[in-house]
Image: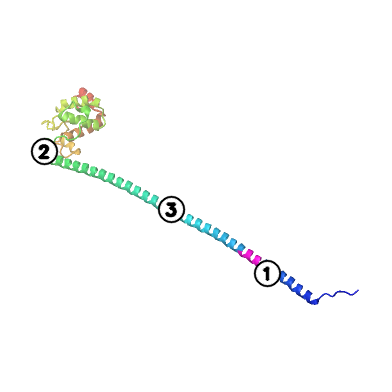
Amino acid sequence: MARRRVSAKGNNVKRPLSTIGVRIASVGLLVAGVIGGVQLAQTRIVTERGADSRLVLQAEADEMQLLRDRQNQVAAGRARQHEAEAGAAARAASEARGAARQAKAMETKAIQKKKQEKEKEKAKASGALIPYTGPIPTSCKEYSGNRATGCALMLGKGFGIDQFPCLEKLWDHESGWNAKAENKGSGAYGIPQALPGSKMGSAGSDWRTNAATQIKWGLGYVKGKYKSPCGAWSHFQNAGNY
């Protein structure tokens, strides 16, 4: 039986078609891979850009917060500075008012002292008695003249008010509280009848015309020798002198 020949030409046609199909499939796969790679790259870029955008936005937010914090700190510092300046101004004003009051008081005191000195000089020149210008305590208000002066100075010397009746009686007998009382025979002079009268110069050069100077000297003498006015009065009652 005769075999049928297969045409060589026919086989040559089929092989190129198969090769082309494979190549087309490969190209398709390659294109798909490229497209997939491109898409993956685009997705990655978009993702990275999104992350970068979030970082930028976060950095901007942090910077804005830092700026606000600094602004708040500056505002708080200015407020504290203004408060400190206001407090310093108030203290300065208070101190200025206090200094002004003190200066006024010192000026008034200086004027009063100068006036008293003028009165003393005038009285000394004329031989008139120098009036007492010091304060008189309430407990001495029942007395007047040199007795009121004696009461005030006695309290200032540290004696109690209960001692004044003794002092009053003592100097009633000695001089009647007359600052110009003079014993022609002995030379005793003034309210306490100092002997000689010049002894009272230790209390002030105006001892001849200033009752306060005489009383100060007399109180010192009484305290030093008899401890108290009542001690001096007790001795006077027994001896007739002190």
Q: Residue at x 25, y 44 (%)?
A: 97
Q: Is residue 84 above or below residue 48?
A: above
Secondary structure found at label 3 = helix
Give the farthest residue toward the top. 238
| Prevailing secondary structure class for the magenta stretch in the rendered image | helix
Query: Seen in the image, is 106 located left or right of residue 23?
Result: left
Q: Which residue is mark 2?
A: 123
Give the mark, 3 or 1, whose residue is nearer the N terminus.
1
Mark 2: secondary structure: helix
In the structure shown, which secondary structural element does the residue marked by tag 1 occupy? helix
Within-10-Å neighbours for mark 1: few <14, some 14–19, many 20+: few
**Disc 1 residue type (three-letter):** Val
Q: Is residue 224 visible?
A: no
**Residue numbers of the magenta segment:** 31-38
What is the x, y in percent for residue 238?
A: 21, 22
The structure residue drawn at horizontal position 16% and vertical position 26%, both measured from the top left corner, is 172
The three-letter code of the residue at mark 3 reads Arg
